Image (cartoon, grey):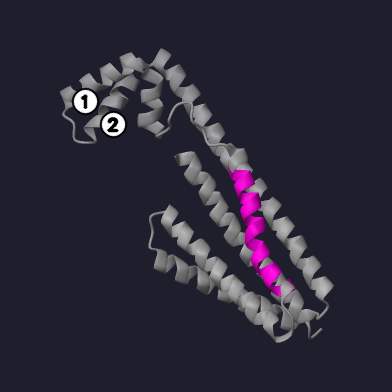
Amino acid sequence: MNEKLNTLRAGVLGSNDGILTVVGVLFSVAVATPNFLTIFIAGLSDLLACAFSMASGEYASVSSQRDTESASVQKERRLLKTNLDNELASVQQFYMDRGISEDTALKIARELLDKKPLETMVSTKYNIELGHYMNPWSAAFSSLFSAALGGAFPLLAMSLTNGIYRWPATILAVIVSVGLTGFLSAKLGNGRPKAAIIRNIIIGILTMIIHYATGKLMNQF
């Protein structure tokens, strides 16, 4: 479940980043030049760069987490051989902190360390399920495809519409898509969907305003 949630989290964050980075480039370039091919190439290039950047970042992050988890397991394996008394006291304290009496906690700790010592130590100390590590490739591919998909919304909106409809269509596509990612992130994090949606929409609007102003400014030179 933790791995699935991590993959979904990477996907939602990747999608949100894809939307905002692509629309930022589109607005800046579209204000500075009316050339559609230039706008499209800039948006597509940024979409690809964002997708691969998010994927490599997620891969590095989850790989680091996986290495840390693996190192923790190896550490506990050594401690069980060299310092069993401290390991026993650690498990006992774990259950005492949760309201179990000292004697009962000691009995639980002894029984667990007799039956499944390594599983008990990594679970109580690090909240790691032995043999279940995060998959960096799952997070990377999830982020790659979601960032590309998210960036495609503003890119297609600006590419497939003409004239006076181009800007409203792009703005609407951004608002709807960032609202959706806000809703999904709130659901995954057990947060408040309404607050997350409003927050994401405000950030999306500010992103468009800032990049539109930047394009206008650059167009003066």
Report the magenta residues as a range: 139-159
Image point 27% across, 17% down: which residue? 110
Image point 47% across, 57% down: which residue? 185
Image point 59% across, 41% down: which residue? 138
Mark 2 Cα-neighbour bin, 10 Å: few <14, some 14–19, many ≥20: some
| Marks 2,1: beta carbons within 8 A | yes
Mark 1 Cα-neighbour bin, 10 Å: few <14, some 14–19, many ≥20: many
Could you give the CA–CA distance between mark 2 and mark 1, rounded to whole angstroms?
Answer: 8 Å
Q: Position of residue 79 (x, y in %)?
A: 42, 19
Nearer-the-camera pick, 3 or 172? 172
Query: Does 80 sit left or right of 145 as displayed?
Result: left
Q: Position of residue 151 (x, y in %)?
A: 66, 63
Residue 184 within the segment the image draws in magenta: no
Which amino acid does the dot numbered 1 rest on?
Answer: Ala
Examine the image and state in which quarter residue 130 appears: top left
Q: Which residue is mark 2?
A: 94
Q: Which mark is residue 133?
A: none
Image point 60% across, 71% down: which residue? 174
Examine the image and state in which quarter residue 154 appears: bottom right
Q: Which residue is mark 1?
A: 105
Residue 210 visible in rendering? no
Residue 92 visible in rendering? yes
Image quadrant in which the N terminus is located: top left
